[in-house]
């Protein structure tokens, strides 16, 4: 089954897409597969000793450590000591692949790059800096200024073998599809790229698929995360979980087809935010893992590599 076939079936509705998924799983002819990374914040503030045994159960080999207030595993890392963490990672055959550091901002990552490099980590996600609510030439110029300001930090990233990924976020410079396109175009170093969060964009699968194609190699991280019913107010758990693939209304088929078309090689992070922040998305570590795996099974490409 080709990616074109999957796209055509995705346009035919949920039943047709479900059949496409079953067919893909049976014949395995689509060469594109997702590479998963596990977000520690999905487990709230649970200890790393409880989270690391779950990583490979989710189809991932790597973990993304989040700091307060979404989690606190990045702080746990420093508290236990880096040697102890390295032993714990080795015990569970897990790699520290990345950290998420909105708290540091894009201009405060140099020490984090050094620490991450010690573990062989490759990616740091953070936010943008600059004016908000811009469009057209004004937005493009602001993104150009931001990329220029990032150059000394990108130079360090290049030395450390780390990539800085800028996530699109509401009320930020990098917030709209066009601002993401400008960033991918103007960031000439492969060590500065886009972390794409569909949650923060229009919930239009065709728009999102085209955006992924436009970003091409500028896309360095992908969140399997949809808006659902949002994450800013307390909801019933089943409503809150609609941020996860397969639970909300967003059809991920065209997004996955676009990722395959650009031969996306970065990590995919199945994700959501609970309310309040800092709690696990389910009560126990095992239940969180089960929820992540349910989301994984809802996608066309389910085999991690």
Image: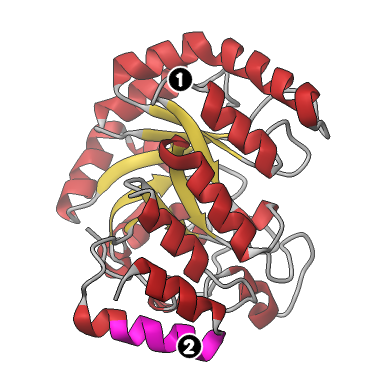
List x then y, in percent, for residue 151. Answer: 50, 11
List x then y, in percent, for residue 63. Answer: 35, 50
Q: Is residue 178 above or below residue 151?
A: below
- Please name the residue shown 74% across and 23% down the image: 130
The crowding category of the residue bearing disc 2, from other C-alpha atoms within 10 Å (few below 14, some 14 to 19, many at least 20), is some
Q: Which of the labelled discs sits on residue 188, or is there none?
A: 1
Q: Nearer the viewer, residue 16 or 229?
A: 16
- Please name the residue shown 54% across and 65% down the image: 280
The answer to whether any part of residue 166 appears in the image is yes
**In the image, 197: left or right of 84?**
right
Residue 21 drawn in magenta = yes
Q: Quadrant of the N terminus?
A: bottom left
Q: Main secondary structure of the magenta part?
A: helix
> Looking at the image, what colour scheme do you see?
secondary structure
SS at mark 1? loop
**In the image, 305: left or right of 222?**
left
Q: Nearer the viewer, residue 240 or 182?
A: 182
Which stretch is magenta? 13-23
**In the image, 28: left or right of 157?**
left
């Amino acid at each position: 089954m080709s990616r074109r076939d999957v796209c055509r079936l995705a346009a035919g509705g949920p039943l047709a897409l479900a059949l496409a998924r079953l067919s893909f799983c049976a014949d395995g002819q689509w060469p594109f597969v997702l590479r998963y990374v596990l977000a520690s914040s999905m487990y709230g503030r649970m200890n790393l000793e409880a989270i690391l045994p779950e990583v490979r159960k989710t189809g991932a080999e790597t973990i993304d450590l989040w700091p307060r207030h979404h989690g606190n595993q990045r702080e746990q890392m420093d508290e236990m000591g880096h040697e102890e963490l390295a032993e714990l990672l080795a015990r569970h055959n897990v790699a520290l692949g990345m950290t998420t550091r909105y708290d540091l901002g894009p201009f405060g990552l140099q020490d984090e790059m050094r620490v991450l490099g010690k573990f062989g980590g490759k990616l740091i996600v953070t936010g943008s800096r600059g004016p908000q609510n811009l469009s057209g030439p004004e937005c493009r110029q602001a993104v150009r200024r931001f990329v220029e300001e990032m150059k000394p930090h990108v130079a360090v990233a290049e030395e450390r073998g780390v990539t800085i990924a800028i996530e699109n976020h509401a009320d930020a410079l990098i917030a709209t599809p066009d601002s993401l396109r400008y960033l991918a175009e103007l960031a000439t170093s492969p060590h500065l790229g886009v972390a794409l969060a569909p949650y923060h964009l229009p919930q239009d699968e065709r728009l999102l698929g085209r955006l992924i194609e436009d970003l091409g190699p500028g896309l360095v991280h992908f969140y399997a995360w949809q808006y659902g019913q949002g994450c800013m107010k307390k909801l019933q758990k089943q409503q809150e979980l609609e941020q996860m693939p397969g639970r909300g209304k967003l059809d991920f088929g065209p997004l996955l087809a676009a990722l395959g078309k650009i031969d996306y090689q970065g990590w995919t992070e199945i994700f959501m935010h609970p309310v309040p922040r800092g709690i696990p998305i389910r009560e126990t570590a095992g239940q969180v893992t089960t929820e992540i795996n349910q989301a994984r099974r809802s996608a066309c490409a389910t085999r991690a590599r």
